[in-house]
Amino acid sequence: MSSSSWLFSLALFVLGAALAVPANAQSRNPVYWDVHDTTRAQPPVVDPGPVPDAPQPPPSDAVVLFNGGSLDAWEHPDGSTPSWIVRNGYFEVKPGSGDLQTKRGFGDVQLHLEWMVPASVEGEKQSRGNSGVYLMGTYEVQILDSHNNSTYPDGQAAAIYGQYPPLVNATRPQGKWQTYDIVFRRPHFDEDGDVVTPARMTVYHNGVLVQDHAELTGPTAWKDRPSYERHASRLPLLLQDHGNPVRFRNVWVRDLE
Ligand code: MG
C-alpha cells in the first residue's frame, strides 16, 4: 500500500469512528444544550395504558416509606413533623409548608412511588402540578402535569431536571395515579472531592422507559448546571413542595448499597 492510500484509509477509519457515535445519544447529552433550552425537541407522547386495578405491592426486601397510613418515615428538612395532609391512603403537599424528606439516608436505590396531580387543571407550564423527587436531596426527577401542558423539555414530567428530557412523554391525564420506578446510582468521589463516577439514573414512567442509564452532569438546578460537590454516601430522599397539591401513595425503596 502506498503511503498516500494508507493515509486515505486512516482518514476513512477516523471519519467512520466519528460517525459511529449514535446521533441519538449525542443529541441527548446535556453538554450540547443550554439548561431549559426551548429548542430541544418535545418528547413524543405515548399513552401508557390504563391505571392498574391495584397499586404494585412492595417486595419483601423493600423499605416502605408510605403505605397509606402515617408519615412516620418523613420530616421537614428542619426536623419538624410533616404538616402535609394524609387522607384516604395517600398524602398531599400542603402548599407553603415546605419540602418533606426521609428521616433515613439512602445512596444507591430502586425507588417506586406513585403520584397524582389534581383533576382540576389550574395554572400552566411549571405552575401546574409541580413537585419533584430528589434522590439524595440533590438530583431531581421532575413531577409535573405534562398532559397537554407544554414547557421546556428538560423540565417536564420525568425529566432529570435541567439536564435530560424524558425519552417520551408517558404522562397520564390529571386526576389519574402515575408511577415512577427509578434506579439511582450515586456519584463517587475521591479524597480530593473530585467526582470519580458520576450519578446515573434509569427511570420508568407508568412502566415506560423514559431515562436510560442517564449520566448526570451534577446536581439538578433551576437555570443552572452546577458541578458535583462531594457529599455523604447516604442522604435523605426528598419530595418538593412547589406550591401545588400533588398527591403521593405507595412509596418504597430497595436499598442497593
Ligand atoms: Mg419540581
Image (spheres, grey):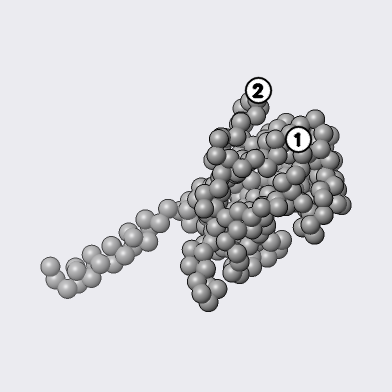
Q: Which residue is mark 1?
A: 69
Please, is residue 240 above or below residue 145 in the view? Answer: below
Q: Residue at x 65, y 22 (%)?
A: 53
Residue 131, percent from left and from top: 75, 48
Query: What residue is rendered at 64% in x and 37% in y?
Result: 179
Q: Could you say which is closer to the camera, residue 111 or residue 71?
A: 71
Rendered residue at 68%/42% (across/down): 65
What separation in Å lies between label 2 and label 1 (alpha carbons)? 20 Å
Q: Which residue is mark 2?
A: 53
Q: Is residue 151 visible?
A: no
Residue 73's spot in the image, x, y percent?
72, 46
Asked if the beta carbon under badge 1 is closer than 8 A to the nearest atom of ligand 1, the reply is: no
75 left or right of 190? Answer: right
What kind of residue is marked 1? Gly
When the figure is inspected, residue 218 is found, relative to residue 25, above or below; the finding is: below
Secondary structure of the residue carrying tag 1 is loop
For the N terminus, the image quarter is bottom left
Q: How many marks?
A: 2
Amino acid beneath label 2: Asp
The furthest residue to the left: 1
Query: From the viewer's perspective, is the residue at label 2 or at label 1 nearer?
Result: 1
From this viewpoint, which residue is outermost toward the right? Answer: 96
Q: Position of residue 19 (x, y in %)?
A: 38, 57
